[in-house]
Every structure is written in structure tokens, then in C-alpha cells.
């Protein structure tokens, strides 16, 4: 007999089905609750609400486990390429040699963007944040490919939109950086792989030859894999909810980019570096800043610390911390911010406030130090997160559309005025 949960309400007992996931995760299916009882559930911030059944990413926040399609993040980060992981997330299996070759070729075919898009860049103010530029540019792609407006077309048409998006996002991201410097745009070079090509478009100049350091390419590949998916986080839930209205993929992902930008989500990587710089400029007194983070009257939080679902360590942070040491050593960089970050981590992890609340460094704590070492400017950090998260957003959108999930539309408990009479303006 299948498992049920019993709920007692107004003296009546209701049986609700229990759903068990493949990793033994349990959920009470409340989809019929309102029909049965007249009640809804209330869960601000969706802290305890499963919005979907998904076969893409498994995360055990208590044990610090993260798997993409069953493969551990540790194995993928050390053995796979970002494009291979993108294929795995989107299509469900690791690609064969031929499948990977076809996928890479298809992406390379679409790396250019319409010349008309260059005019958009010119219209932005010089100080425009690249995340604002990127989200607008990605939504604008829908105007160049109107056939993408119907997300339910053939499998081939859907794949074309997906490949175009994966191909063009690095070009638009790198151009948003070039534009902020008023430097000439560098066109994609398809003899390079995905990460090399992005670095080339970011850092090459037409006046001189540019050679990408292999350590930099490897580090970028690892960082992008670590960011590639993270189940139903804020931006991914945004993607699923926007996509559920059958908006096109470009606009849907643009909404995900906007959600990612916030400092409590992907924007934290920029905030971490700015915080470390502030602590450094303030004399490096880590204890003072830990005390500020604990003080409820002070709005300051330790950026890069804490996570909604990880109540042990964030496995991505462990990999990034090691990669950080490795990259700085190989590139012969001595960054004082790394020493501050390590001291901050040590002090916080030994502090009762952080221990009681299970607050550990998250993926954003050390990633900024690596990006800085790779020469990526601070304002571009969240764009790097978007570049990494793109295959996850696409995979989640594809799963949602293929499962024909209904439009996302939560309910509410109304706490405003009850019905009242209109008062004429002369009497107010
Ligand atoms: N510094 C100080 N106190 C904190 C922090 C922090 N970074 N994070 C949480 N707390 C405290 C919080 O004040 C609360 O204390 P109390 O129980 O006394 O009220 C308790 O810990 C629980 O925090 P919460 O805000 O209720 O937890 P949440 O699950 O709603 O928020 C979070 C998760 C990530 C938004 C939060 O930990 C935070 O603001 N961290 C800093 C921003 C950050 O690093 N974000 C990146 C997340 S990882 C990348 C991604 O996937 O987006």
C-alpha cells in the first residue's frame, strides 16, 4: 500500500499521498488539498515547498552532496568539459564522442550575433552594469529569431534555439565588458573551445596577439561546471515560472539573469570581493567584521556565507577553495584578499553564532578571488555565474515544457482590508 500522510482539520481526517524521490526524498502531495479541505498551504520564500519533480540535479544540503544527472560534482569538475556537462544537463546523458562533436560544431556555428545588435551596445551609458546589458541583450535575441516565439515547435527548432543561446551568450557577455571599456568588440574565433573563445573575446585586442594561459582556461572550465545547475534556486524557479507561461526561451532566460543579479543570489560573488576589499582597506580586522555580521542592529551580513539548502558545507565551495590556491600559485599571484578570506572563514567557523545557524562558506565565497586572478573585473562576476548557469536554466526549462507542467501561479492568504465603501475625494 502506498504511503499516505494524515491531516486532521475541523475534526475530519484527510489522507494525502506521499511521494518518494529516487534518492528517498519524501514529499506530501498537497495538489488536491484545497479541493478537499478549502485550505491552502502558506510557505513564504518556498522554504519547504517542492515546486516540481525533476530528474536533473540532486542536492542533499545536510550531507553536502551535489549530483548532476546522478554524477557527482567532484567527478564532473575534475574530469569533464563545461560543454560536455551542458549536454549532460540538457539531454540527460553524457554525450558519446560523436554526439559531443556534433553539439560543439552546432554551437560554434552560431557564435556570431547580428551586426544590428552592436547598435544596442552603443546606446547604453558607459557605466551600465553588464548584468543589465546582458539580460536586455538576451531578451532582444527573441526579436532577431521570431520563430523562437512559439516554444512548442519541433524538436529540431527547439534545439536550434537552445544551441543559439549557448553560442551567443558568451559573445554578448564579452561584448558588454568591451563596451564598458569603449574597446573594439572581438569577434568569436571558432578554432577555440568554449572557454578559450570567451576569454579571447574578453581580453584580446585587434592590435596584438593574444594567447590564453591554459591554467586560466582550466580554472574557468571548473568554475562554469560548478555553477551549471543547482535545482530550484531563485533564478531557476524564475526560469520555470516565466517559461510556464509559454514565453520564448530567450525572454525566459533573460528573466533568470535578472533574478540571478540580486546580492542574495548570484550577485553575492561581486559583493564578496567588495566586502574583502573593504575589510582589507579597513586594516584587515576580521573580528570586527564578524561582530558586525552577528549584530542584528547592523544590516551587514558576511557575503558568501550561508545557504538556503546547505546546512553542512557547500561541496562547490570546497572545490573552489582548492582551485583558488592552485590558480594563484600557478599564476604566481599573491592576493592579500585570499589571506583575509581564509581568516574570515576560520573565525566564522569557530564562532557560536555561525555554528548554531549552520552558516558555511558558499560557492561565491572564493569564486571572486579566482575570477580576479583570471583578470575578470568585479562587475563581470555575476555575468560569469550566468554563463555557467545557462545550461541548467535551459535543462530545467526543457524538462518543464516536455513534462507539460501547468502555468505557475501560487495562491496567497489575503490580510488587507475587508470590503469597504468608496469615499469621495472631497471627504478624505
Ligand atoms: N551573515 C550573517 N548572518 C547570516 C548570514 C550571513 N551571511 N546568512 C544567514 N544569517 C543568519 C540570519 O540573520 C538568520 O539569523 P536568525 O535566525 O538569528 O534570524 C539565520 O542566519 C538564517 O538566515 P536566513 O536569512 O533566514 O536564511 P535564508 O535561507 O533565508 O537565506 C541566504 C540564505 C543565502 C540568502 C543568506 O544566508 C545570505 O543572505 N547570505 C549572504 C548572501 C550570499 O552569500 N548569497 C549567495 C548564496 S549561494 C549562491 C546562490 O546559489 O545564489
Image: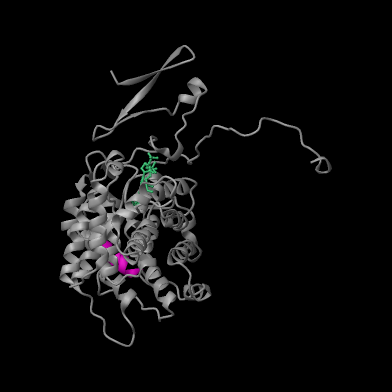
Q: Is any atom of residue 226 visible in this view? A: yes
Q: 281 left or right of 133?
A: left
- 152 vs 181, nearest the viewer: 181
Please tell me which residue lies in front, 27 or 375. Answer: 375
How many circles with numbers are drawn on the protein?
0
Q: Quadrant of residue 354?
A: top left
Residue lying furthest right = 426
Quarter of the figure with the C terminus: top right
Residue 198 placement, left or right of 239: left
Q: Is residue 103 magenta?
A: yes
Residue 19 position (above or below residue 326): above
Q: Position of residue 287 (x, y in %)?
A: 29, 54
Quadrant the N terminus occupies: top left
Q: Is residue 96 visible?
A: no
Magenta span of residues? 102-110
Residue at 23% of width from left, 56% of height from top? 343
Amino acid at each position: 500500500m502506498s504511503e499516505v500522510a494524515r491531516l486532521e482539520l475541523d475534526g475530519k481526517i484527510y489522507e494525502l499521498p506521499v511521494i518518494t524521490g529516487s534518492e528517498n526524498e519524501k514529499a506530501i502531495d498537497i495538489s488536491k488539498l484545497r479541493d478537499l479541505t478549502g485550505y491552502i498551504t502558506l510557505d513564504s520564500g518556498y522554504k519547504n515547498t517542492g515546486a516540481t519533480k525533476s530528474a536533473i540535479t540532486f542536492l542533499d544540503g545536510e550531507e553536502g552532496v551535489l549530483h548532476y544527472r546522478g554524477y557527482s560534482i567532484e567527478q564532473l569538475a575534475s574530469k569533464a568539459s563545461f560543454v560536455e556537462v551542458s549536454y549532460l544537463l540538457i539531454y540527460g546523458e553524457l554525450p558519446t564522442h560523436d554526439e559531443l562533436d556534433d553539439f560543439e560544431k552546432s554551437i560554434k556555428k552560431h557564435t556570431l550575433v547580428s551586426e544590428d545588435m552592436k547598435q544596442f551596445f552603443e546606446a547604453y551609458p558607459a557605466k551600465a552594469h553588464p548584468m543589465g546589458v546582458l539580460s536586455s541583450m538576451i531578451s532582444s535575441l527573441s526579436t532577431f529569431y521570431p520563430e523562437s516565439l512559439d516554444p512548442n515547435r519541433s524538436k529540431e527548432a527547439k534545439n536550434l534555439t537552445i544551441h543559439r543561446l549557448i553560442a551567443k551568450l558568451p559573445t554578448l557577455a564579452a561584448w558588454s565588458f568591451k563596451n564598458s571599456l569603449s574597446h573594439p568588440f572581438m569577434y568569436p574565433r571558432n578554432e577555440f573551445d568554449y572557454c578559450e573563445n570567451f576569454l579571447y573575446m574578453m581580453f584580446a585586442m585587434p592590435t596584438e596577439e593574444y594567447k590564453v594561459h591554459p591554467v586560466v582556461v582550466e580554472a574557468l572550465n571548473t568554475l562554469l561546471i560548478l555553477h551549471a545547475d543547482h535545482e530550484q534556486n531563485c533564478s531557476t524557479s524564475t526560469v520555470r515560472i516565466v517559461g510556464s507561461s509559454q514565453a520564448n526561451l530567450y525572454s525566459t532566460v533573460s528573466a533568470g539573469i535578472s533574478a540571478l543579479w540580486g546580492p542574495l543570489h548570484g550577485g553575492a560573488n561581486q559583493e564578496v570581493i567588495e566586502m574583502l576589499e573593504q575589510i582589507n582597506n579597513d586594516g584587515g580586522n576580521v573580528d570586527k567584521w564578524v561582530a558586525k555580521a552577528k549584530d542584528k542592529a547592523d544590516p551587514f551580513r558576511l557575503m558568501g556565507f550561508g545557504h538556503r539548502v546547505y546546512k553542512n558545507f557547500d561541496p562547490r565551495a570546497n572545490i573552489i577553495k582548492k582551485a583558488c590556491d592552485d590558480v594563484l600559485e600557478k599564476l604566481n599571484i599573491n592576493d592579500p584578499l585570499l589571506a583575509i578570506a581564509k581568516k574570515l572563514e576560520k573565525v566564522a567557523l569557530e564562532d557560536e553564532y555561525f555554528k548554531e545557524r549552520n552558516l558555511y562558506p558558499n560557492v561565491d565565497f572564493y569564486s571572486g578571488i579566482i575570477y580576479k586572478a583570471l583578470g575578470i573585473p568585479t562587475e563581470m562576476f555575476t555575468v560569469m555565474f550566468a554563463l555557467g548557469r545557462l545550461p541548467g536554466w535551459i535543462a530545467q526549462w526543457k524538462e518543464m515544457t516536455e513534462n507539460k507542467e501547468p502555468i505557475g501561479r501560487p495562491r496567497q492568504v489575503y490580510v488587507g482590508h475587508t470590503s469597504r465603501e468608496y469615499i469621495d475625494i472631497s471627504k478624505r
